[in-house]
Amino acid sequence: MPEAKPAPKKPGRDRYLDLLRTTALVRVVVYHLFGWAWLTVLFPSMGVMFALAGSLMARSLSRPAIGVIRGRIRRLLPPMWAFSAAVLTLLFAGGWNPGKDPDNGGTWGWISLVNYLVPIGAPSFPWHLGDKAGLLEDTWPAQAAGPLWYLRAYMWFVIASPLLLRAFRKVPWATLLAPLGLTAIVGTGLVTIPGETGNAVTDFGVYGSCWVLGFAHHEGMLVRIPRYLAVSVSALVMAFGIWWASGHLGPDGWDLNDIPLAQATWSFGFVVILLLYSPSWQQLPGRLAKFDKVITLSNNRAVTIYLWHNMLIMATVPLIDLAYNLPFMDDARWSGALDSTYMLWMFVLVWPLIALAIVSTGWIEDLAAKRSPRLWPDGSRRTKKH
């Protein structure tokens, strides 16, 4: 008798991928808080996030492409609108006039505000607004607009995915490696594309191979490659990235965000290894199980966390500064202790602020996904009434 086939796995979320997404989000917050360049080498969060999004997109494209694209964009825009409304309110309240912006003034300055509604390009903002010693540092607009580049790249990847997936299925290796080739051209200065168009093309090249790696993961391509070969080649690609970075260090040293080709190759090799060893957990194993609720919450509110975290990091400063008004802070020992631990207190305080953002605006992600709104979706089961 032929052996019985194993029962198919129940459909559901891949908890390993959820763990990677949570790790990437935490790393992004820590990086933007402390600015440690080595974090971009330790864990290339953006490459991981694009790869995970590419895998989910490939799975969704078993349905009609137009509906999938519309659904993905619908999930993205409402949380962005809430964030943009807050940022624009603060900008206009601070006296900013887009028509008089030195970089994108006149009519174009007002037209560029469309990018706060649909991230097809880069939104305009003043590099300095307010008083440097004011409630928020005068560079807060640049910090607030910083995360929006990811939404722009994500949306263009989503729109391009039907064609990219079709190309991948016909010529997988060419489709997988083409973005790295593009980065070698536009990310090294060999060909220069000016302005935000150049930034968008560079972003597409740097993270395009990670997005297509998500396709490869979903299609089972990676498991068909001998593991020793895949790991060896990935290690060589990563070594090239480090070598290239060593000769092209930017203003922040080893920060790979400033070195496109190093970012692309290091992220590519790193993601290959992560996906190659993907255990496809339906439940978090062992000690990881105690983080189940945190991982579930962060995945259900990934857009909210990503959008708001930079603003909330800056919001910790005026809150911590209130401590200097306490009576015992006249003692130099106490004020000195706060000075020396200031960044640590920012790290401690930003997480309650992120939790507040989740409760106050995170439910918009549910409405965007056509689900019932939830304040704290950590997977806890409600007790049924009898």
Image (spheres, rainbow, N blue to C red):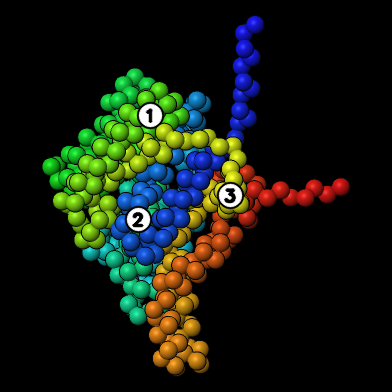
Which residue is identified by label 1?
227
Query: What separation in Å lies between label 2 and label 3 (alpha carbons)?
Result: 24 Å
Report if residue 285 is visible in the image. yes
Query: What separation in Å lies between label 1 and label 3 (alpha carbons)?
Result: 27 Å
Which residue is identified by label 2?
39
Would you call the spot at circle 1 few (<14 residues within 10 Å), some (14-19), or many (20 or more)? some
| 199 on left or right of 216 | left
Residue 129 location, quadrant: bottom left
Would you call the spot at circle 3 few (<14 residues within 10 Å), some (14-19), or many (20 or more)? few
Element under disc 2: helix
| 3 on left or right of 136 | right
| 272 on left or right of 240 | right
Seen from this angle, which residue lies furthest left?
Answer: 190
Q: Are marks 1 and 2 in contact (CB under 8 Å)?
A: no
Residue 335 location, quadrant: bottom left
Q: Name the residue nearer the viewer: 137 or 102.
A: 137
Would you call the spot at circle 2 few (<14 residues within 10 Å), some (14-19), or many (20 or more)? some
Q: Which of disc 3 and disc 2 is earlier in sequence?
A: 2
Report if residue 79 is visible in the image. no
Which residue is identified by label 3?
287
Residue type at the position of mark 1? Arg
Element under disc 3: helix
Element under disc 1: helix
| 259 on left or right of 284 | left
**Residue placed at 45% from the left, 29% from the top?**
218
Relative image position of residue 310 (x, y in whole percent): 41, 62
Relative image position of residue 81 (x, y in whole percent): 47, 54
Q: Height in image: 218 above or below 248? A: above
